[in-house]
Image (spheres, helix red, strand yellow):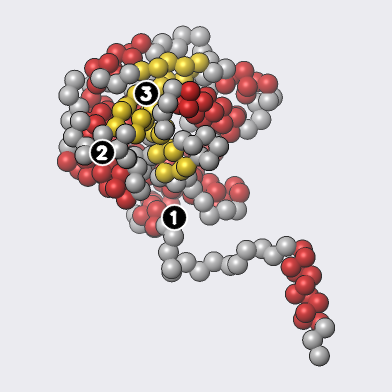
């Protein structure tokens, strides 16, 4: 299969690559391929630019079986990758067991942590220097809103993150794609996405925030664009200073009351 995409998709992909310095000569990139629409398209998109990019890079994919069910079959993904000339590596990690061991508390956090750990370990052991994930623009905005609502922090994941402990870089080349665009991508590559095996799929805090944003958009069509703009560092930002420590506040108290 020769991977091809509409020009508008190439434009979004290259914008992310150039703006955030996602590719370099000699990169060995490992794609986290779950089988969902986003990661399948990411694998396809990177294969589409692999041979024409002025920066030469190698590409492979890894699929993690979290053992949520007994009938996990990676062979369709192996065949899909083979059609693109992308080596595919099935991997198993007992994430379901880790969640059960934790008593079911914070299952999304536990799943995410162990997924990343397993994939990062595999990448390091096999000489990859970058791991690519298929997070898109909606994911970033939803994470931004979740941070505000559930942790009181203005933060989201970055398009590129350097992991000091492993030396890996995590890249997210689909960061400028909207989720609604990605729903249409199976017609490009012909692969039918594999349903998520997660027992909480569609029942998470992220899903709640997704629906919350949709509700806001029904009364203001600019909401998503404004939230996306708010994620950017900007000289126009006007935020309170950081909360002072107890010692700093005590020093201010003494300096105020002791002035003569």
Cα distance between the residues tagged 1 and 3 = 30 Å
Residue with the mark numbered 2: 55
Residue pictured at 32% horizontal, 40% vertical: 23
Q: Earlier in the sequence, mark 1 or mark 3?
A: 3
Q: Earlier in the sequence, mark 2 or mark 1?
A: 2
Q: Are marks 1 and 3 in contact (CB under 8 Å)?
A: no
| Left or right of 126 in this view: 104 | right
Circle 1 Cα neighbour tier, 10 Å, few/some/many (<14 / 14–19 / ≥20) = some
Residue 208 seen by the camera: no
3D distance between C-alphas at marks 3 and 2: 19 Å
Q: Is residue 23 above or below residue 240?
A: above
Q: For the residues carrying marks 1 and 3, which lies nearer the camera in this image?
A: 3
Where disc 2 sits, the SS reads: loop
Disc ID at residue 231: 1
Task: Tell which tag, 2 or 1, sits nearer the viewer.
Answer: 2
On residue 91, the disc is: none
Q: Quadrant of residue 86?
A: top left
Q: Nearer the viewer, mark 3 or mark 2?
A: 2
Answer with left or right where residue 256 lies relative to residue 176.
right
220, 145: nearer the viewer: 145
Q: Would you say 221 lies left or right of 233 here?
A: left
The picture places residue 1, in percent across and down from the top left corner, at 19, 20
Residue 122 against residue 220 in the figure, above or below: above
* Quadrant in which the C terminus is drawn: bottom right
Determine the secondary structure under disc 1: loop
Q: For numbered disc 3, what is the local secondary structure?
A: strand
The percent position of residue 100, horizontal first and vertical second, equals 65, 20
Dot 3 corresponds to which residue? 61
- Quarter holding residue 191: top left
Point 44% across, 60% down: residue: 233
């Amino acid at each position: 299969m020769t991977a091809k995409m509409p020009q508008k998709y190439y434009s979004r992909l290259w914008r992310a690559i150039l703006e955030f310095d996602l590719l370099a000569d000699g990169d060995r990139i490992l794609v986290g391929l779950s089988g969902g629409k986003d990661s399948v398209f990411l694998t396809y998109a990177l294969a589409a630019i692999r041979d024409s990019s002025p920066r030469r890079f190698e590409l492979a994919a890894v699929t993690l079986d979290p053992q949520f069910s007994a009938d996990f079959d990676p062979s369709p993904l192996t065949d899909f990758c083979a059609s693109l000339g992308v080596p595919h590596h099935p991997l198993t990690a007992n994430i379901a067991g880790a969640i059960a061991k934790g008593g079911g508390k914070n299952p999304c956090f536990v799943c995410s942590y162990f997924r990343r750990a397993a994939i990062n370990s595999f990448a390091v052991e096999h000489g990859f220097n970058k791991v690519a994930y298929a997070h898109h623009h909606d994911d970033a905005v939803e994470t931004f809103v979740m941070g505000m609502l559930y942790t009181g922090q203005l933060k989201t994941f970055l398009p590129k993150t350097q992991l000091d402990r492993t030396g890996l870089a995590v890249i997210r080349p689909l960061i400028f794609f909207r989720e609604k665009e990605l729903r249409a991508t199976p017609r490009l590559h012909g692969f039918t996405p594999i349903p998520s095996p997660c027992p909480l799929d569609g029942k998470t805090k992220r899903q709640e925030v997704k629906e919350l944003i949709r509700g806001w958009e029904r009364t203001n069509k600019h909401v998503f664009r404004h939230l996306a703009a708010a994620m950017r560092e900007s000289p126009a930002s006007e935020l309170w200073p950081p909360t002072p420590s107890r010692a700093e506040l005590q020093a201010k108290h003494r300096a105020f009351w002791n002035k003569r």
